[in-house]
Amino acid sequence: MPPRRWIVGIAGLPGSGKSTIAQALAGAVNLAAGAPVAMALGMDGFHLTRAQLRAFPDPDAALLRRGAPWTFDPQGLAQRLALLRSQAAQSLTWPGFEHGVGDPVADAIHVPPSVRLVLLEGLYLLHDAHGWNLRGAMDACWFLDVPREVAMARLAARHQAAWGITPEEALARIARNDGLNAEIVWRSRARADALVADEVRP
């Protein structure tokens, strides 16, 4: 019988802690197994490039709303997930994202055949519009059920640290883009297999 690779999605609002939870779970599984059998992956590598966004009918709006569901490549993500499942015995690659450049990097991450469990984190794993239809590509998908005000506060702090901006500028940035995306993500939570509370971190 060919080896099986399981894919569990972790969706949630921006700032909800998806990456942190995915990495922690992968580490815990690997520690318990005594081998690198789990890996956390993200969907940032499936952002459309800035060049692709500049080719939109309204490039300024596309660049301003980068991070919205229509500024990703969900078909490419679905195809790569299918490969993770169908070629579980093979070494595969996964795209990353170079924040210094602001664009995806193809084949940046190596997924070895030892990985039996992929913890996939991302905003739109449960979204069902704009070409998104990943529900069948995952064995399960959870939603981090973090209050919006908590997630947005974390996100504002992240923006301040990353961009060296004031709290007011961070909140304005969220109002222009991240807050709109959060509304879209929140509406998808009913499609999750489980709602996972995060009551530990501030």
Image: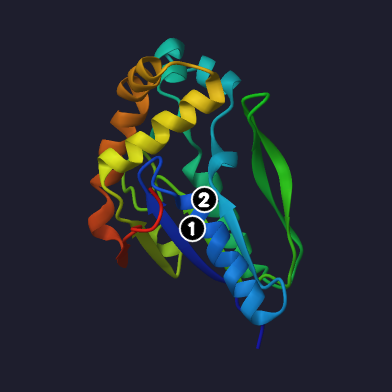
How far apart are labels 2 and 1 at the CA level? 6 Å
As drawn, 57 above or below 16 = above
For numbered disc 2, what is the local secondary structure?
A: helix
Which amino acid type is shown beneath numbered disc 2? Ser
Marks 2,1: beta carbons within 8 A: yes
Q: Which residue is mark 1?
A: 21
Q: Residue at x 53, y 27 (%)?
A: 161
**Residue 182 coordinates in the image, percent (x, y):** 31, 37
In this view, the residue in front, 3 or 186, is: 186
In this view, the residue in front, 76 or 91, is: 91
Q: How is the image coloured?
A: rainbow
**Image quadrant assignment for residue 96:** top right
In this view, the residue in front, 152 or 88, is: 152
Q: Which residue is mark 2?
A: 19
**Image quadrant assignment for residue 76:** top right
Q: Which mark is residue 97?
A: none
Residue 100 appears in the rendering: yes
Q: On the picture, is 182 further left or further right than 84?
A: left
**Which residue is situated farthest in the bottom direction here?**
1
**Residue 164 coordinates in the image, percent (x, y):** 53, 18
Q: Residue at x 29, y 29 (%)?
A: 180
**Residue 81 coordinates in the image, percent (x, y):** 56, 58
